[in-house]
Image (spheres, grey):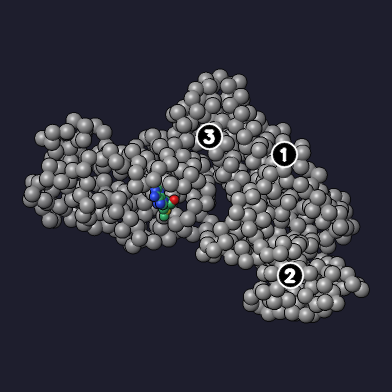
């Protein structure tokens, strides 16, 4: 460390923390619109504002005087200069300024000036030509890239950005955020415009708009293809006259898990485990399920109007825990009994209600035998039969016999997700062919740095697969139906996989919450928010302890007490 002079960085002296915190809090609010984090779920995401601020502040030299290096200005002037840099940070962190080219140009200029000062101080270093080239600002590397906040912001403020992670999903997220978009910036979309679709309304495609448009177009193409084989599994429903009659598409099927009654007199009957009978508690549009017992059998009827007292507890024996009452006998069904039945593979499911699209409103209908049979007839040709980890924190479903990832899905969900998954591979080939047809050269694949038709096919496949992952979050048996907004609530609202007793099965082929096309559109909207007129980005899979990017930094560049990445992480922890 003796040979290298590194001026004190702004981050080592002061930061406008209140402003950064405020911007971070704003960025975390729901309803701020499309955000790069929506491209794919990842844990421990840092707000982009914090990442941007701390990266800028560790690239920019503090203006204060440093006698040892003979640099900087006196106290009063340093204060004024610092305030000027703070003002720039205050502007940079605002959500609405995320892609403000004027502010970003100012930030890049400040970084360039600081780098030139550092190069000047080190011009006598024996390796100055390679280490201190004033025309090339240093590149950035996050060896724990995760959700990509730091690599993305490094790229935005003008650094060549490298991200690596041990987890291949994180690597794909980083590729989707920093590597792919700049390669295809300002390109026209190549995908097929669906008849009567509003897609392609944009006449001129700038930035990531062409790429985003193709995610939407191929999302629609993919669903049209899938429906050619799986449509019979997603039947429409006959609407009663009071709802206008005719056939209506189903938004979701609401299911209840079942166990054999523990009461010996009813032990041949599979009784429902229902945590609530309430389907809608919206004032004026209330609906609920009413169980009807007839002899040794029961059916469910959906009724409109205020739910009766106790309906909010379904067949539970109280508001807490997995304790229920047998619908037929009133006998208690203990959590232990349910666990044992689950482990013996004897938990079943029974259709509780059907939510359909009735013109301008949602319609709640009683289950039909036909709909139940169709769902249960689904035969997936492939399942993720990978053992589920039984002891992980927050993953309690193993207690109930869920032993592989496949067990988290209904057969129909497995068919739907599996069919789309296969089509993502076909979409990759179609994108390549469509791009070739409009004159794109084939070029190399993404892994070899390509940016032609082959690489574009692979790029689209990444985003289409991410849209499918989003669907999987909504299309599994651990989702919930929310009577307040009458929508499917995805599984990963928090970082756990918790057991559900009743759950909605969203129609993945419909333009509604949980559908594939809305998921593709959502991913596309988020892609549009990514910077595109930026330096190159690169993401790779590597163990941080042993990777070729960090390991090539010369030892005398690393000051254990002032390592900028560790400083960044320390400050971020304070901010969140
Ligand atoms: C907390 S996350 C990073 C969050 C990220 N900075 C962001 O803002 O989204 C930590 C990441 O480190 C990765 N990781 C853990 N051990 C690793 C190792 N030995 N090498 C590389 N990455 C590792 C994990 O996969 C995870 O993505």
Taking the spot 48% from the left edge, 44% from the top edge, the residue there is: 168
Q: Whole-percent x and y of residue 333?
A: 73, 76
Taking the spot 66% from the left edge, 63% from the top edge, the residue there is: 401
Q: CA distance from mark 2 to mark 1?
A: 33 Å
Q: Is residue 91 visible?
A: no
Which of 226/25 is in front?
226
Q: Whole-percent x and y of residue 38?
A: 52, 49
Q: How many marks?
A: 3
Q: Residue 226 got which mark?
A: 1
Residue projecting furthest to the right: 295
Q: CA distance from mark 3 to mark 2?
A: 44 Å
Q: Is residue 7 above or below residue 321?
A: above
Classify mark 1: helix, strand or loop: helix
Tell me the residue that label 3 is attached to. Answer: 459
Q: Residues within 10 Å of mark 2 (few under 14, many from 20)?
A: many
Q: Is residue 536 above or below residue 85?
A: above
């Amino acid at each position: 460390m003796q040979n290298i002079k590194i001026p004190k960085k702004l981050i080592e002296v002061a930061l406008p923390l209140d402003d950064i915190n405020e911007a971070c809090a704003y960025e975390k609010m729901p309803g701020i619109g499309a955000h790069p984090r929506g491209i794919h779920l990842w844990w421990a995401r840092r707000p982009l504002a914090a990442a941007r601020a701390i990266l800028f502040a560790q690239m920019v030299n503090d203006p204060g005087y440093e006698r040892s290096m003979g640099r900087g200005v006196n106290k009063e002037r340093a204060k004024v200069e610092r305030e000027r840099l703070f003002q720039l940070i205050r502007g940079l962190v605002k959500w609405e300024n995320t892609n403000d080219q004027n502010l970003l140009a100012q930030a890049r200029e400040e970084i360039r000036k600081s780098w030139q000062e550092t190069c000047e101080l080190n011009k006598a270093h024996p390796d100055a030509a390679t280490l201190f080239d004033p025309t090339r600002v240093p590149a950035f590397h996050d060896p724990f890239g995760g959700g990509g906040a730091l690599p993305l912001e490094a790229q935005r403020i003008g650094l060549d950005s490298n991200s690596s992670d041990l987890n291949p999903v994180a690597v794909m997220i980083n590729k989707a955020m920093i590597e792919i978009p700049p390669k295809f910036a300002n390109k026209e979309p190549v995908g097929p415009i669906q008849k009567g679709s509003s897609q392609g309304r944009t006449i001129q495609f700038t930035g990531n708009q062409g790429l985003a448009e193709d995610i939407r177009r191929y999302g629609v193409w993919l669903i049209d293809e899938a429906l050619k084989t799986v449509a019979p599994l997603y039947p429409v429903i006959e609407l009663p006259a009071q709802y206008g009659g005719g056939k209506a598409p189903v938004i979701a099927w609401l299911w209840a898990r079942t166990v054999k009654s523990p009461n010996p007199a009813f032990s041949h009957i599979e009784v429902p485990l229902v945590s609530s009978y309430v389907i809608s508690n919206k004032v004026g549009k209330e609906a609920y399920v009413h169980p009807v017992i007839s002899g040794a059998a029961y059916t469910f009827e959906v009724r409109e109007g205020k739910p009766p007292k106790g309906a909010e507890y379904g067949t539970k024996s109280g508001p807490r825990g997995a304790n229920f009452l047998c619908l037929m006998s009133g006998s208690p069904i203990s959590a232990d009994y349910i666990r044992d039945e689950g482990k013996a593979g004897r938990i079943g499911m029974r259709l509780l209600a059907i939510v359909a699209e009735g013109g301008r409103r949602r319609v709640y209908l009683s289950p039909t035998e036909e709909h139940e049979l169709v769902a249960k007839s689904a035969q997936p040709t492939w399942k993720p039969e990978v053992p589920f980890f039984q002891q992980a924190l927050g993953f309690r479903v193993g207690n109930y016999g869920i032993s592989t990832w496949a067990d988290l899905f209904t057969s129909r969900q497995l068919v739907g997700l599996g069919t789309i998954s296969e089509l993502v591979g076909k979409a990759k080939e179609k994108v390549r062919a469509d791009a070739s047809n409009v004159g794109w050269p084939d070029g190399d694949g993404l892994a070899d740095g390509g940016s032609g038709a082959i690489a574009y096919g692979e790029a689209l496949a990444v985003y289409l697969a991410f849209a499918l992952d989003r669907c999987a979050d909504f299309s599994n048996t651990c989702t919930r139906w929310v009577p307040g907004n009458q929508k499917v609530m995805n599984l990963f609202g928090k970082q756990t996989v918790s057991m559900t007793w009743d759950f909605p099965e969203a129609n993945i082929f419909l333009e509604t919450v949980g559908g594939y096309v809305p998921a593709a559109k959502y991913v596309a909207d988020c892609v549009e928010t990514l910077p595109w007129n930026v330096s190159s980005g690169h993401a790779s899979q590597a163990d941080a302890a042993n990777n070729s990017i960090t390991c090539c930094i010369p030892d005398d560049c690393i000051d254990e007490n002032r390592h900028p990445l560790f400083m960044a992480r320390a400050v971020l922890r304070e901010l969140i």
